[in-house]
Amino acid sequence: TESVLVALQIIASHHWTLNIADAKNAFCQSERLKRPNGAIFVEPCQGLPLSSDQLIELVAPVYGLNDAPLLWHRTLTDYLGTLGFQKSMLEPCLWLKRDRWGALEGLILIEVDDLIAAGTKEFAPGLRKSLTSRFHFGKWQESEADYGGRHFQQHGDRISIDQEKYIREQLGVLHLDKNRKAN
C-alpha cells in the first residue's frame, strides 16, 4: 500500500497522467520454461485436436506452477531494463526511468500482473507503445481505473482512492434469529 501511495504522489506532483494496466494471461507471456530436471508433459485440455492418450509439452509458465510468478516478474523487469528503467533502491516493485541529465521522466509500479505507469508528456506515449508491443494487456486505462481492490480517479493535480466497489461486494445481509440471546 505504501508503494502505491508513493507512486501516486510522484504522479500527482509531476502532473503526469495516471495509467493503470492489467497484463492479460501474464504468466503465459513470460520467457519459455527452462527445466534442468526435464520437461513437463501434461494431458491436453478439451478443444485441442489430440486424443486423450497423447501428452503435450508445457513450454509456457502457466498459473499454478510454483515458478510462474518469478518467470513473469523476471521477463517484465528484464524488458523494463532494456527500456532504461532501473529498480528503485527503496521499493523493489517501483521502476524509475531518468533522462540523460538524471531527471525523472517515468515510473512503473508492478503488482504481479497489474501496473501503474506514468511519465512526462513526451515519454509516456512511447512507454505505452513499447509495453503494448511486447505484452498483451486486458486493460490499459488512463486517469480512472480499479487496481488491487481500490478505485483510483485522477482530478488534475490530485488522485482520489476509494474502496466502495470492494466494500459493496463484501456486504451482505446477516440474518439473526430474534430469539437469539447475547452471551
Image: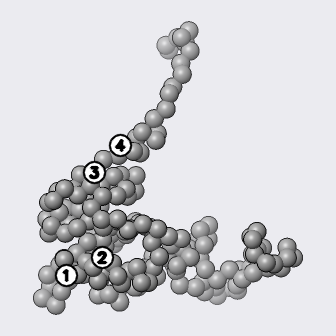
Judged from the image, the secondary structure of the residue bearing numbered disc 4 is: helix
Q: Quick check: can you spot residue 7? A: no
Judged from the image, the secondary structure of the residue bearing numbered disc 3 is: strand
Residue drawn 35% across and 52% down? 150
Q: Which disc number belongs to residue 161?
A: 3
Q: Amino acid at mark 1?
A: Glu
Tag 1: Cα neighbours inside 10 Å, few (<14), some, or many (≥20)?
few
Mark 2 → mark 1, Cα distance in angstroms: 18 Å
**Callout 2 touching callout 4 (CB < 8 Å):** no
Q: Amino acid at mark 2?
A: Trp
Q: Position of residue 126 (x, y in %)?
A: 29, 83
Q: Is residue 165 above or below residue 140?
A: above
Q: Which disc number belongs to residue 35?
A: none
Q: Position of residue 146 (x, y in %)?
A: 37, 56
Tag 3: Cα neighbours inside 10 Å, few (<14), some, or many (≥20)?
some
User: Which residue is disc 2 drawn over?
Assistant: 95
Tag 4: Cα neighbours inside 10 Å, few (<14), some, or many (≥20)?
few
Q: Position of residue 134 (x, y in %)?
A: 44, 84
Mark 2 → mark 4, Cα distance in angstroms: 29 Å
User: Which residue is disc 4 drawn over?
Assistant: 164
Q: Amino acid at mark 3?
A: Ile
Residue 157, quarter of the rendered image:
bottom left
N-terminal of the pair, mark 2 or mark 1, is 2
Which image quadrant: the N terminus? Answer: bottom left
Q: Which disc number belongs to residue 122?
A: 1
Judged from the image, the secondary structure of the residue bearing numbered disc 1 is: loop
Q: Amino acid at mark 4?
A: Glu
Judged from the image, the secondary structure of the residue bearing numbered disc 2 is: strand
Residue drawn 37% across and 58% down? 147
